[in-house]
Amino acid sequence: MSDPRTMSDEQLLAECRWEAFRGPGPGGQKRNKTSSAVRVTHLPTGLTGEAGELRSQHQNRVKAVRRLRHRLALDVRQRVEVAGFVRPAWLEQIVREQGTLRVAVTSDRYPAVMGLVLDVLTATGWRVAEAAELLGLSTGGLVKFLERDGQLWGKVNQMRPKAGMGVLRAGS
């Protein structure tokens, strides 16, 4: 399976199934008459993204794909060889000279960056300093990147104890 985290929308959606349904909650007559909520399922992994908070099915589809990409980045791992690891060219463009990752959570590149960071953390046994060095970042820069996303922070702190490491503290 190729890496769904870095696929174009067209490639990713070719591996997905869409469902439209009536969203829960308030919304009056329009919500009761239209199926504007959507669920997109990535068939190879079974992961889903849902959105139904907007009245437009098109806008909900965009949000659902963004949420699916985020789930894929959190849950799909690609093997990384620590020995001889070379930072991908696309990440070179994102990393700044200060040793920090400057990519917004809303950026189209964010899921791929998040996925690579988790792949490297997995390969280093969840050792943040070692992962930061491989990625060409400072340890503090990597921790700041992790802190900005609650789900990413939670994933790292879920996995570190399983590897015999302590949880990360915010601001550390």
Image (tube, helix red, strand yellow):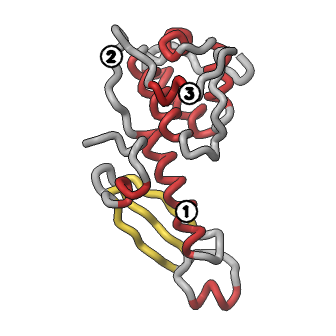
Amino acid at circle 1: Val
Residue at image position (38%, 39%) is: 76
Residue 93, label in figure: 3
Nearest the viewer among 171 and 5 is 5
Q: Are marks 2 and 1 in contact (CB under 8 Å)?
A: no
The mark nearer the N terminus, 2 or 3, is 2
Marks 2 and 1, Cα distance to the nearest angstrom? 34 Å
Residue 26 in the image: state x and y as whole percent: 69, 78
Residue at image position (39%, 52%) is: 47
- Looking at the image, is mark 2 or mark 3 nearer the viewer? 3
Regarding mark 3 in the picture, which secondary structure is present there?
A: loop
Q: Disc 1 designates what residue? A: 62
**Label 3 Cα crowd, 10 Å radius (few <14 / some 14-19 / many 20+):** few
Task: Give the answer, above or below, for where 84 lies relative to 93.
Answer: above
**Label 2 Cα crowd, 10 Å radius (few <14 / some 14-19 / many 20+):** few
Q: Disc 2 designates what residue? A: 81
Residue furthest right as drawn: 171
Q: For this view, does 97 lie left or right of residue 13?
A: right
Residue 85 quadrant: top left
Task: Give the answer, above or below, for where 110 lies relative to 85.
Answer: below
Residue at image position (71%, 16%) is: 172
Regarding mark 1 in the picture, which secondary structure is present there?
A: helix
Residue 58 quadrant: bottom right
Amino acid at circle 3: Gln
Residue at image position (57%, 35%) is: 152
Residue 78 in the image: state x and y as whole percent: 34, 31
Marks 3 and 1, Cα distance to the nearest angstrom? 25 Å
Regarding mark 2 in the picture, which secondary structure is present there?
A: loop
Quadrant where the N terminus is found in the figure: top left
- Looking at the image, is mark 3 or mark 1 nearer the viewer? 3
Marks 2 and 3, Cα distance to the nearest angstrom? 21 Å
Residue 111 in the image: state x and y as whole percent: 51, 41
